[in-house]
Image: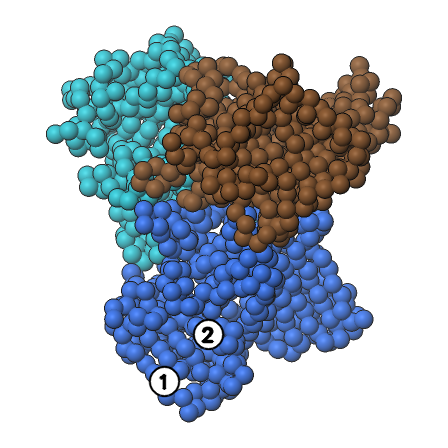
Chain colours: A brown, B cyan, C blue
Amino acid sequence: MGKQTWTILDSHHGVYVDSLTIASGELPGAAAPIRVAKRRLHGGPCDGVDIIEIGNGEMNVTVVPTRGMGIWKAESGPVRLGWTSPTRGPVHPAFVPVFDPSGLGWLDGFDELLVRCGLESNGAPEFREDGSLRYPLHGRIANLPAEHVQISVDVETGEVSVTGRVRETRLFFTKLLLTTKISLLTGRSEFTVTDTVTNLAGVPGEMELLYHINFGSPLLEPQARVVLPIRKMAPRDAVAAAEIDRWDIYGPGIPGKPETVYFFELSSQPSGETLTLLHNAESTHGAGVAFNVHELPCFTLWKNEQPECDGYVTGLEPAVNFPNVRSFEKARGRVVTLEPGQSRSFSVTVRAYRSSSEVETARAEVLELQQGVLPQVSRNPISEWSAGAEG
Amino acid sequence: MGKQTWTILDSHHGVYVDSLTIASGELPGAAAPIRVAKRRLHGGPCDGVDIIEIGNGEMNVTVVPTRGMGIWKAESGPVRLGWTSPTRGPVHPAFVPVFDPSGLGWLDGFDELLVRCGLESNGAPEFREDGSLRYPLHGRIANLPAEHVQISVDVETGEVSVTGRVRETRLFFTKLLLTTKISLLTGRSEFTVTDTVTNLAGVPGEMELLYHINFGSPLLEPQARVVLPIRKMAPRDAVAAAEIDRWDIYGPGIPGKPETVYFFELSSQPSGETLTLLHNAESTHGAGVAFNVHELPCFTLWKNEQPECDGYVTGLEPAVNFPNVRSFEKARGRVVTLEPGQSRSFSVTVRAYRSSSEVETARAEVLELQQGVLPQVSRNPISEWSAGAEG
Amino acid sequence: MGKQTWTILDSHHGVYVDSLTIASGELPGAAAPIRVAKRRLHGGPCDGVDIIEIGNGEMNVTVVPTRGMGIWKAESGPVRLGWTSPTRGPVHPAFVPVFDPSGLGWLDGFDELLVRCGLESNGAPEFREDGSLRYPLHGRIANLPAEHVQISVDVETGEVSVTGRVRETRLFFTKLLLTTKISLLTGRSEFTVTDTVTNLAGVPGEMELLYHINFGSPLLEPQARVVLPIRKMAPRDAVAAAEIDRWDIYGPGIPGKPETVYFFELSSQPSGETLTLLHNAESTHGAGVAFNVHELPCFTLWKNEQPECDGYVTGLEPAVNFPNVRSFEKARGRVVTLEPGQSRSFSVTVRAYRSSSEVETARAEVLELQQGVLPQVSRNPISEWSAGAEG
């Protein structure tokens, strides 16, 4: 009986824990220095936001149930994962005007390390012919609060995890349930997010899902690099095309520099497992994003080389689709259909590399995945992937 | 001095009671097993929602001040009134995007037994010529919090009631005040909602009001029936017209089945009192909705014969208007004008029938109202009632 | 060390004080009867709103951190500053649909004595060519919560002040920070708001700012008057033009009377300091709004001579721009550009005049400012100032 579970929230049964702290001393037999803390934030834009911090001595992660079980920040020894957004959160959804007619209100809450974009839609906002908003930028899931949350610690295996359920439902329309488990394993400087999306409806449903995983300073810095195992690659637009020769390297923040976005199909192990890497200029620190291309076939690299004050950040974004307007993705077959009751699962692991040798090992892993695969690089946007591409 | 009153909320004077429980033991002389409880919900989509439960041994009702004094659920012995929505609430208005440009955001909070639609407008969303939203689906009142709430118990009469005030006002625009009393009378398995809508403005104001009273399983089931005293009837649209021969009976939920809606003018006693009935397949349980057709001349029957997971539900909806777009209702004279300071009152009683004999008595009551009145049934939508009807 | 400071809110460091009361007795050496109280409101439309009351025996002010550090009410002896809005607040931003496609949702929270309109935009809502909302009425700042709040008392000087920071930022768009200090000085029946707006971005940013300072009964009454030192004046539109001969006097509230708005360039001392005055019919009570025309060159007078129930109110509104649609102001050069990191400061003092002699002294001050300046009065709207003016 090594596993203990605390129910933090169960909306349907009136369960809510305002505050909880569990130290290793209270977990006899725990091998690692486990840390669990749940708090409710008060005042300002964060008022009413619940956060859960879990740690195992190697990795600390802050989960935000109130923001769709997103992950605000993480740190592993000297490596801080996350970024500094012009928005200072975690912002309560009441202050995020997702349905601002511009479709861009989502940005007001955007400051997480890992934020899910979906579930009905993600990507650029889409408008009806009359100009009214149809799908807001990146969808609703990040601004919907979890209805059920638990924390578990298994003192034998040392696994610490948070599970949560978030419902994105509307009578007559989408009825999707996200069930997530965010877990830390003993001795590992990584966390794994395992999501299941279930169509609760009696009719087929559709979904999009993109993991917007964002890294800023100090990991991101001039001469930092991203290393990807590439099968196929194209810039999203002309702006990205113009810089394609430096797609994998970062420069200093330049005021007003437009974002550059690249789309990829990655190579992988036969099982589908793949790894992407971001490391700093000296290759002493890095972050890895591992996932399975059978689950998440589309990969987007977002580079926002603007000054720190404007959000110096890059996104490594495994997804079921590219973040174009939904109708474009639908026409290309990248919107997932779920039969009634059907579920689809997705798993993403984010790793911290805390030394040159760890970075080198990761780089070798990526290069190994590239072995025997000749990257098919388009220097221009391709119509299969980019809504704006000609041809 | 048999009446005791507790002020739960008085926004203007800083009064707020977080939690309150009154048991019969604390009410010396109370004839019935009175129950009063006020709670604040925490966490998830319900975070910050106040609910009040009142009961008199025959009927328990849950009132939601935070959602415009709507009624979430009720139960009377074996009869559960309410339904299971794909949305799990009661949802805090901060999570309901009423002004989503689609006009359909109201659905995100829709899971009540009784929800008022209004006050400025209700019915289908209406758009300006340029496609921008003018009136959102079913209006704002259900997502506006009460500013004043009291609970009263009269130990002599046994009446238990909740009163509340909700303000739907905007400088230069609508200025309406809803005052409601929701009451239970000793020995009765029913509750009565008595509403007064007052035009606070110095100029004439307009209002619409519809009581969306919703029943799901287990009361609603295949072969359940609705029984109405009909003066005039028409289907809302072609979909409903196609099923008009089974308008009063329910089938199993069918995935993707579109809603069917019927409009009625009901017959009544000379005083205007009328009764509508829904009962289960075996006629052992039922629910009645009683009101006065002089106050609420329009009656809408909403059938959503979809599977439980999609919201298996029917709505019995007395109203001052039909739930078409507001401009259509206005043109047909069904939008109410209130002079400056003028009030209009409305009363609706919801009854639980807990046995075959109670159901039979109710059915007899409805049939009595039908006596001598030949129902005027249109098999097709009529232009007087349906926005989309031809002719 | 006469100054004591209490941090009420520091979002980034998890500091939040739910409730605080400091009486003079707790401030040894305080010359004046200082009063400081911080509360959180609960229930109804105010649920979750933080308010801070400060007083020095001459003036009491209620600051609302949750509503962008606006000022709800003030009073000085017999003089009550503020008004009675059809909306009863202070309303939590979660209940204010700023992005209602009509652009008018801001009105749902409008009941303050002093509310800032801005920072990206203010004035009438502006729409894109397709009819979708581009800039909502009066902008966002009044519905954004402060992220940092402090209260200070200097027992030596007797100064009592509240400082706050509010962030209006969106990745890729506006990144403005408002820093405000609201202070009371010993022995004075006035408060001063000193604001600094900083462009946090690495690129130039733009701002508008208008102080919507609103007075109602009993100060405002039939035969009340406004006294301004005028350099140039024009009505906003034909409605105001039709009443230009009584622009400075107030009548009784008339149901349905449209608002009348006048635009001004005011005369001032060489330093730019100027004063505007509103006094009651008997000239026994008054309110002054003092500011610097170099900081706030545009002055708008808003008269809403409607009955009390509809909001009997007038606004004295110093600003960097006139409250037209933003594009009009931009074309006229009245939208302020801030270079990266640049700040602009603004100061407004609101005074209560509590006797005939105080009112007379203020009137003399205004007339002194008028000395030698011939008012240039246009009886019709002018195209330089009014979006709708012809010619």
The amino acid at mark 2 is Pro
Whether labels 2 and 1 belong to a single chain: the reply is yes
User: Element type at marker 2?
Assistant: loop
Q: Please, which residue is most extreme toward the top here?
A: B282
Q: Residue A120, percent across and down?
A: 47, 28
Q: Name the residue under label 2.
A: C297
Q: Please, which residue is most extreme toward the left here?
A: B391
The residue sitting at 43% across, 27% down in the picture is A384
Q: Residue B265, percent across and down?
A: 22, 28
| Chain of the residue displaying label 2 | C
Side of B66 where B244 appears, left or right:
left
Most foreground residue, A251 or C55:
A251
Mark earlier in primary sequence (2, 1): 2
* Gap between marks 2 and 1 measured at Cα: 16 Å
The residue sitting at 84% across, 26% down in the picture is A32
Q: Can residue B167 be seen in this view?
A: no
Q: Mark 1 points at which residue?
A: C375
Dot 1, crowdedness within 10 Å: few (<14), some or many (≥20)?
some
User: Element type at marker 1?
Assistant: loop
Q: Can residue A288 be seen in this view?
A: yes
The residue sitting at 38% across, 31% down in the picture is A391
Q: Residue C94, percent across and down?
A: 51, 46
Q: Where B130 sits versus C358, above or below?
A: above
Quarter of the image holding residue A14? Answer: top right
Quarter of the image holding residue A268? Answer: top right
Side of A69 where A173 appears, left or right:
left
Residue A248: numbered disc: none
